[in-house]
Every structure is written in structure tokens, then in C-alpha cells.
Amino acid sequence: MDEVRKQLNFLLKKHGYGFQYSVLARVLLLAHKKKSHWSVEVSEFPVEVQGVGTKIDFMLQLKNTRIFIVAECKRADPKFSNWCFVKAPYVRRNRVKEVFFVDRVRYDKPMCRVTQDELTILSQENAFHIGLVVKSIEKGEGTKSETDAIEKAATQVCRGVNGLIDLADKKPELITSGADNDPGAIFIPVIFTTAKLYSCPCDLSSADLETGNLDISDKELTKENFVYYQYHLSPGIKHLAHTEQSSYRFSDVLDREYVRTIPIVTATGMDKFLGSFGDNILIRLRQSR
């Protein structure tokens, strides 16, 4: 029994169940103390995108709205627990600001339609385009490399969002009250992690043109409580619901169809993030109308 208990404890830790439900407990506590307006809607919610099924770790709902956080919890392997983020000097033509696109799903008989609400990024300084996992000196827990942990987590949480959009297309009663001009529902991907987050202010375009080498020895890494990751999702995890087309250039399609902002939040950043994120979203939605 001691060996079974030991192995069970190891597996619960490795697969992140303890972290997932400790995050949920924190969400409930913050709501109880009125330090956050987010409530827990469901956990382990099944969805499917383009024939691939998955489960959303949990969903949070903003009080008195149909604005939802779609959450992915990632307990990082200690050996791969340094997540580092860098800004890209070029993303698309005529980009003058970082934008935060959120998917809004409305029901207009006989179908749902998806639009993108454009928001100014919540923190311009905290918007990054490249995320890399850097090994630590700690001992690893598994036999596989976790250098793609950021990519896997981002793909998983975006698949969850798009699965919910496909579900809403089949069950529109989930996102509408039936009233005229119903605003529908907004789904926002968020990753909660035990990883340590660092930002690096390096200029990638300063690399040597002949060798591609980049010297960042004089750049100071900054430890972050949360960052906004500008993730370019692949078409294979996109929803199949009807999307309003108003894009006529590749650059517009990139922003509206494929770039999604994913807040990545550490345990120490949870209180501040959940305490202010909902209010900031509402303010920016009002400003964008």
C-alpha cells in the first residue's frame, strides 16, 4: 500500500491534478472575499474541434455577463520550468499597436456567427510574440523533453475555445437569451502555470546577418507574474462556425483569424490578474463600441 500510495501521489502531481484544483480553490476564495468577479462554471468540460476531442480544464464566468475564461492549467516539469518571452520586431504591415482580439459568438437565426472584438492590449509592455522553454538546473520528473510546453499549452487552450464556439453553433441556447441585439458570448483563453515567467528586452533584428548570431549578454531578464502571449494558432484547431468576413489583406486575416492573445499567469500573479482582468475587459469592450 505504501508503494501504491507513493506512485499515486507522483502521478497526481505529474499530471497536474493538484495544481488544477488548487487554482480553482483560489478562484473560489477570491470570489468569496469579493476580490474577483469571476466564478467557476465547469471543470473538465469536453469539446471537439475538426474531429479531435479534448477537455477544458475549467471555465470561469464574469459576473452578470457571458464573458468566459477558458483555462488550461500547466504544471511545469521542474527541469523545464523557465518560460522566456521575447517581442518580435515585425508581425504584419502597418501594425502600430498590439491588439487583443476576442471571439464573440452571436446567434442570428438560423445560425451562429463569430466576430472579433478588437481591444487595445491590456499591457503594451507585457505583450510578447515568442515563447521559449529554457532548462533549469533542477531534476526532471519525466523521460520526455518539455521544451515545447508553451506550444502544447497554447494549442490546447485555443482548441478548447474553438471547441466551445463549435458547440455554441450546435446549441445556441448556451450563448443567447433570445432577446434582440443579444451580445452573445465571449471566450478568452488563459493559461495558469507553475512555470517561472521571464521577459527579455532583446532586439531580434540586431542579430548578425551572416551568422544569425544574437548577443543578449547585456540584457537583463525580468521576472513576470503574467504575460500576454500573442499566439498564432494553426487552421487545424480553428472552429467551423460561420465567421463574418471583413478582411481583404493577408495582414488583416492574420490578426483577425489567427492571432489570439493568451494571458499566461503564475500562481503569484493570480490575485492581481483575476482582480483586474474582468473590469479591464469590460472597459475596453465599451470603448471599442
Image (cartoon, grey):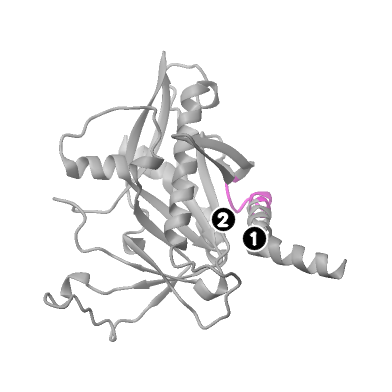
Residue at screen point 42% across, 25% down? 106
Check the image and report above or below for 282 versus 210: above
**Disc 2 marks which residue?**
73
Looking at the rendered structure, the kind of residue marked 1 is Phe
Check the image and report above or below for 213 versus 204: below
Residue 15 highlighted magenta (yes or no):
no
Q: Position of residue 179 (x, y in %)?
A: 48, 17
Inter-mark Cα distance, 2 to 1: 7 Å
What is the total number of numbered labels drawn onto the structure image?
2
Quadrant for the N terminus in the image = bottom right
- Pointers 2 and 1 in contact (CB under 8 A)? yes
The front one of 268 and 5 is 5
Could you tell me which secondary element the residue under label 1 belongs to?
Answer: helix
Could you tell me which secondary element the residue under label 2 belongs to?
Answer: strand
Residue at screen point 81% across, 65% down? 4
Quadrant in the rendering for residue 134: bottom left
**Disc 1 marks which residue?**
19
Residue 36 highlighted magenta (yes or no):
yes
Q: Where are the magenta residues, as a range?
A: 28-38
Q: Residue furthest front?
A: 143
- Give whichever of discs 2 and 1 has the lower sequence position: 1
Check the image and report above or below for 146 versus 96: below
The front one of 28 and 83 is 83
Residue at screen point 46% across, 76% down? 135
Q: Position of residue 177 (x, y in %)?
A: 52, 21
Instruction: Decide: few, some or many residues near mark 2? Use Cα within 10 Å; few <14, some 14-19, many ≥20.
Output: many
Q: Which mark is residue 92?
A: none
Looking at the rendered structure, the kind of residue marked 2 is Cys
